Image (cartoon, rainbow, N blue to C red):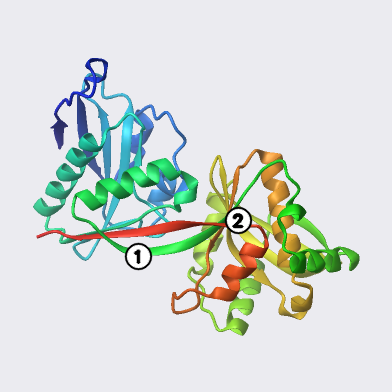
Amino acid sequence: MQFSIPQHKVTPSLLRNYTALVVQNNPDILHRFHIRWPLWLFNTPLHVKHQTASEVYTFILTDTATQTEAFGIFHLFIQQQAGISPSQASFGSFEIAERISHTEFSEWLTGIEGFAKERGINSLRIKHYPTGYNPSRSTFVRRGLLRRGFELTQSIENQFIPVTQTNFDEGLHASERRRLRKCLRAGFRFEEWLNPPAREVYTFIQHNRQLLGYSLSFSFEQLQMWLSVFSQHFRVFCVKDGDTLASLSVTVRVGESVLYNFCPADNLTYRTFSPAVLLNKGLYGECQQKGISLLDLGISVNEAGELKPSLKRFKENLGAKNCDKYVFYKTLL
């Protein structure tokens, strides 16, 4: 199925014509197209295939003339007549080239909605990546969705640390600097846990969450799959006291410019040391070495999904800035 987006005059040199394609249960179709930017991990064909959905549609905005280059991509998963993006990931949403205008995006959205209605899909729910990842594209997508009648049903503050040549310690609040010195004086060390046994990692995190009264948002099988299938993206870093784990985090290389501190957990025996400070210092250094410009610390919420001020304050004491993480929703009548 395909529908054409008509040409729109911006300037005489920017006359263009696009074709919107959609393919069912075959995200690998993207490999046929040239894409001028690296996709976020969660929108890559391999990750989409591992989000365990029985039905997924991949929408591609391409040039009509050659249909060899993608200027926009979007994956829509179907669950009980509802369309969601993503199915099982931190975010999905649209990835769109900067050359696409608001009018062209609106036309594409109109076609996607019409396609969904024809198949009895009654709603669309889109979870966008943190705006700090790409502020200009996030503003573009937000504006386009709101103009098409989507509701902004959730806007949660997300914390991140911009990675520069500056030493991590310089961005620390005095209290966290003291805790860092305490860890270093005690001989704690930061390191990557190479080829970590998934069961050990999961048990450590699960025990930490249980003591804090939290549940885990993923299963052991999911962690096992991430560490094996996506071993270049999902890596485990830790802080050790001798051979004892004081703190660890499952991190995700979400994109070339972003490292996500996805699932940190502490050995609560070491709570007075706050080894998470040393852990984040190590992750910041890892980013500097790999040319990563953003260390994502995620949202700061409790078990009920409500803001947890103490966690947000801790991240800000590490030098974190705030951005937004949006969820959009639209009922299709």
Q: Could you classify mark 1 by the number of other residues whose Cα lies within 10 Å: few (under 14), some (14-19), or many (20 or more)?
A: few
Residue at position x 65%, y 38% from top?
291
Dot 2 falls on a residue whose secondary structure is strand
Callout 1–callout 2 Cβ contact below 8 Å: no
Q: Earlier in the sequence, mark 1 or mark 2?
A: 1
Residue at position x 49%, y 47% from top?
133
Between the residue at mark 1 and the residue at mark 2, the CA separation in whole angstroms equals: 25 Å
Left or right: 154 with respect to 260?
A: left
Dot 1 falls on a residue whose secondary structure is strand
Q: Which of 307 and 273 is in front in this view?
A: 307
Label disc, if present, on residue 258 of the rendered structure: none
User: Label 1 sits on what residue type?
Assistant: Gln
Q: In which quarter of the image is the N terminus?
A: top left
Please tell me how many numbered marks the rendered image carries. 2
Residue at position x 32%, y 40% from top?
73
Residue that carries the numbered disc 1 in the rendered image: 154
Asked if 214 appears above or below 142 in the picture, the reply is below
Residue 106 placement (x, y as % from top left)? 20, 41
Residue 261 appears in view: yes
Residue 154 placement (x, y as % from top left)? 35, 65
Residue at position x 17%, y 38% from top?
107
